[in-house]
Structures are given as C-alpha cells and as structure tokens.
Image (spheres, rainbow, N blue to C red):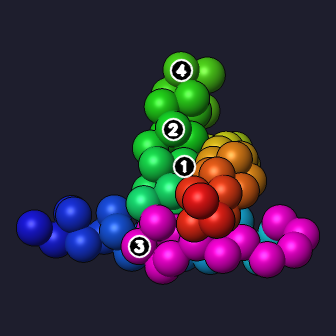
C-alpha cells in the first residue's frame, strides 16, 4: 500500500516539474499530471535499467534525468490532446 502511495507522490512531483519545465499553460487536471509523472518515472527507470545506470553508487542522476525527460515528453504530448478533447 505504501509503495502505491509513494509512486503516486513521486508521479505528482515529476508531473508538476514537467509542467514547470514546459512553456505555456498545460491545462490538464492534477490526476492526469500525477499519472503522466508516474508513467515518466516508470519509463525512466526502465530505460535506465536497460542502459545499466539504474543503480549506481550515490545519487542516480542519469536515472532521475531520464524520469524527468519522459515526464516532460508525456505532458508535452498529452496536454494538447487533452485540450482538443475538451473543445469538441
């Protein structure tokens, strides 16, 4: 149970960071921000494991940068689609 809460908390933090990094407004709800951040974290972890940099001595900077990068990419792709969905 705590792992799910941790994933959602980290997902929310990554989603908010992604929205701050992107220019302009991203009018997506908080729950979608959290889900996209969590998905970015999972994708970043997967790619870091594939590259062999998931677990290093000290802080895993490469893994964290991959997580934020995927979260930014997901928010950048989904936010305009969310806006178009609301217009129809």
Q: Considering depth in this image, is 22 or 56 the residue closer to the camera?
A: 22
Q: CA distance from mark 3 to mark 1?
A: 14 Å
| Residue range corresponding to the magenta coloring | 22-34
Q: Is residue 68 visible?
A: no
Which quadrant, please, contains the C terminus? Answer: bottom right
Q: Earlier in the sequence, mark 4 or mark 3?
A: 3
Q: CA distance from mark 4 to mark 2?
A: 11 Å
Spot occupied by residue 51 in the image (x, y as percentages of width and height): 61, 22
Q: Earlier in the sequence, mark 3 or mark 1?
A: 3
Q: Earlier in the sequence, mark 4 or mark 2?
A: 2
Q: Earlier in the sequence, mark 3 or mark 2?
A: 3
Circle 3: is it few (<14), some (14-19), or many (20+) Cα within 10 Å?
few
Q: Considering depth in this image, is 69 or 65 the residue closer to the camera?
A: 69
Q: Which mark is residue 43?
A: 2
State yes or no: discs 2 and 1 in contact (Cβ < 8 Å): yes
Which residue occupies 52% across, 69% down?
33
Which quadrant, please, contains the N terminus? Answer: bottom left
Q: Kindly identify which residue carries mark 1.
A: 40
Q: Kindly identify which residue carries mark 3.
A: 31
Determine if the magenta segment contains residue 28: yes
Spot occupied by residue 40 in the image (x, y as percentages of width and height): 54, 49
């Amino acid at each position: 149970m705590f792992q799910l809460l941790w994933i959602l908390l980290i997902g929310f933090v990554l989603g908010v960071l992604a929205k701050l990094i992107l220019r302009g407004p991203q009018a997506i709800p908080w729950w979608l921000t959290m889900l996209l951040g969590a998905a970015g974290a999972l994708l970043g972890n997967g790619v870091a494991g594939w590259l062999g940099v998931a677990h290093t001595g000290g802080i895993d900077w490469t893994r964290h940068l991959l997580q934020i990068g995927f979260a930014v990419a997901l928010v950048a792709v989904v936010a305009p689609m969310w806006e178009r969905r609301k217009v129809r």
